Amino acid sequence: MNGVRRFLGNPTAAITKDRPGTSRSPSPTKELPPPPSAAFSTRGLFIRKDRKPLPPVAGPSSTNSSPTTTTPPLRRKAPPPEWEEPPDLPPHPPTNGGQLVNTRDALLLSLMSSEAMVDSRGYEILSAEEVEELKKEHTILSSRVGALQRKLATEIKIRDAAQNLARLNASSSSTPSSSTHISRQSTTALETAERKVEAAQTELWRVQERAANVDRRLLEHPCEEHDDGDGPLSPMSSVSGAGALAPKFDGAHLFAGNAGAVVPGKPRGARARQREAEFEDARAAVEAELDDARAAAAAAADLADARAAAESELAQEQAALEQERERAIELEGRVAFLELELESSSRGNDDALRLRERVRALERELSDTVGAAEAETAVWATEKATWAAERARFEQQEAQLTDDIENERSQWEQEREELAAQAKDQIATAADGLRALVQRFDVPLFSRESGLGVLVDALQRHLEKQTQSAQEFEGLLTAEVEKRAAMSQELETAKEEIQTLRTRSPSSRPSSTQHPSEPRPTSSITFAKDAAGFVAILQPLWATLPSPEARAARLSGATRPFRAGNGRSSPSLRAGTPGSPGPSISDLDVRALKSLYTPGTNTNGSSNGASAALPNSGPGTPGSPRSPVVDGGGLGPGTFSVEATDRALMERLIRFAQAHDLLKKNAERAQKLAQDSNAALETYQRQVRMLEEQLASSDGLQEQVDQLAAEKLAVEERAAEQAETLRQLTEANAVLSARALQLAEDAAAAQEELRAVNTASEREQTQRLALLEEINLVQTENGSLRQQLRALGKL
């Protein structure tokens, strides 16, 4: 094989056994030699025609003097890097160096030609039609191998995911019934995935074996074809004769290495083969390691996905458990709150009824929760059946899609032409629209051309200018807004200063002092001089005592102020808290008299902040609300003794009233505490029993939640499988679409290749005749060289 390559003028290229899937095309349509002429023969064959004696050493001078320097090299495609010779083969001789390999060494060329002929003796020569069929079949098989490899990788991922799901279901199932059901489903899914993987592997091996056979036949064909001299890449000879066409050369017995000749040993052949075998083993090992690494990476990715899904489900379950715990804590808080209400409430029976209603509400809520969980379980079961039906429908759709793709291939060509026409129309419309925009907004053009690029460039510059102007305007607007904010802040500061000055002004202070002895403006009673003074003295006492309205409100149970009026009216009764008994009328009378006879106290102390609103004044101020003691300036000494006696009596009456009220309150409190303790103890026992029942029901609900979570996980896994199947169908559709386009292009190029093949067949016949003549000349020169070698050996 290497001898044929060197014999045909390319001594450096060698096709190895481990070529890639796409073989080099020997079709003459790619690189066809020119018509026969004397200037386009191969380098080796043209050297054989040179009858000059061989120089002792091949140097640059001999190369330059040879007529082969004017012969242009054969136009051939350079082989890919993987076709180059291994490192242990003889290197390519340098084109300009101190020592060059003698290209006129007839013995070396003869030995290489003989070796190539012996190696390719058993190869089969194919016709042009067979070669084209093999090429097409090889292309189809290569695409099928790629598709099957992707399908196998997908099935392997699905199988790994099924394995991970089976392990998770085996480890996370809580109840025996759910564990058996889920494990059975996981095992079935895993067996199905393994069967699909085995089927995909078998199909891939079968297609790869078939592609390898086609590739081997294509590789053997050019070897034999080059050896026989009738290949499509064989050069044209300078000799043009009209000899008969010989189907096969039968003068191989004249060459060394034939059946009756001794084949000389090839230098460094064993080492080269050993090195080549080592390289093959190393490459196979590296490829195996690479496949293992890819499989491990894919498995790691699947495990990571499964782990992430498991962690998310675990987090959700933990969150649900935390919610249940929080709810239990909330229920405990409610129970404690109810206990506190029972202890602090005076209406035990009403609270008990209310607690019973709450308990019933909680029980109804619990039953509703159980019903909702059962409804969700039924919904999930329905969704599960729906997903199974959808999966079957997807499989049917896959079969229908396969049939529809075959039917739609004929329509894609027409659609492609229509889309091309529409694209052209859209481009023209877009260009017209851009020109209209340029003319409308007076956009300057920077080129004389009117293409889309020029229009887009002009519009882009115009928009950049507009954007820059907008940014400058925004900067100015921001500065104005900041100035306005500063002015607003200064205005607010000025307003605050003005308000402060007004507050500090003496004219703004309200007059809040009134003489306590001033008569009411609403009073229409006129007295005599002494009676008016006496009435003026007793008016504060009358204002301090409770009004008749307050007494009526106390008797009727209402809690409202004693008397509506201004600040001089009597103190209002402060509403107590709900559920607590209010002050009695005697307490009000006693407190009013106490405040009256106590110097330095506020008579309106029972009101909510009535005295706090007045400004503080000294004891001598006429309008001060403090010290409302009756002033007896106009009475005699007897009046003061009566006043002292009344004060002592009132103090003693106050002490008796306070002691009586204290004893009464203590008795009522003791009786109420006894009743509340009994009711609270019974309620606590009932609440404990109710909490125990709720805790048991919560445990049952937690088990149901765990089971539902496991079933939800299984349903989500099936949904993921269906999504993966849909994605595979989409990829298959895309592959088939690309394949249809490729077939259309191949059909368009087939006509040209057919014409080229016809032309090449005519040229091949002429090349065969020329090659036979060249081989005859080579044999003659080989015989003369042998005679010279024998003569030199005798010397």
Image (cartoon, rainbow, N blue to C red):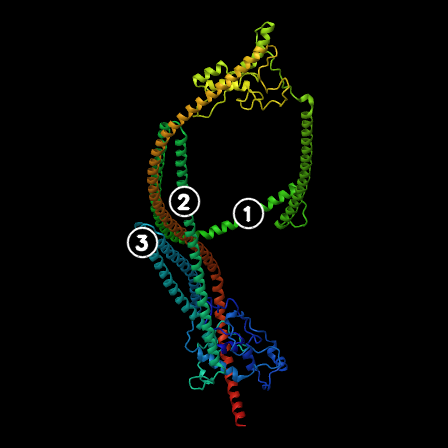
Q: Nearer the viewer, residue 24 or 344?
A: 344
19 with respect to 697 (left or right): right
125 shown above or below 104: above
Q: What element carries label 3?
A: helix
- Of the numbered discs 2 and 3, the one sitting upstream in the chain is 3
The residue wearing badge 3 is: 184
Q: What element carries label 1?
A: helix
Q: Amino acid type of disc 3?
A: Arg
Q: How far apart are marks 1 and 2 (CA)?
A: 60 Å
**Residue count near mark 2 (Cα–Cα under 10 Å), binned few <14, some 14–19, many ≥20:** some
230 shown above or below 447: below
Horizontal and vertical percent for residue 74? Answer: 55, 73
Horizontal and vertical percent for residue 368? Answer: 35, 37
User: Which residue is at a point 33% across and 42% down the rendered structure image?
Assistant: 696
Horizontal and vertical percent for residue 175? Answer: 32, 50
Can the viewer see residue 138?
A: yes
- Of the numbered discs 3 and 1, the one sitting upstream in the chain is 3
Of all residues shown, which one is farthest toward the bottom?
795
Horizontal and vertical percent for residue 303? Answer: 42, 57
428 with respect to 187 (left or right): right
710 with respect to 223 (left or right): left
In this view, the mark in front (2 or 3): 2
Q: Is mark 2 on a helix, strand or loop?
A: helix
Q: Distance between the residues labelled 3 and 1?
A: 60 Å
Q: Nearer the viewer, residue 617 or 636?
A: 636
Q: Which mark is residue 425?
A: 1
The mark total stands at 3
Q: Nearer the viewer, residue 287 or 602?
A: 602
Rendering quarter of residue 406: bottom left
The residue wearing badge 2 is: 320
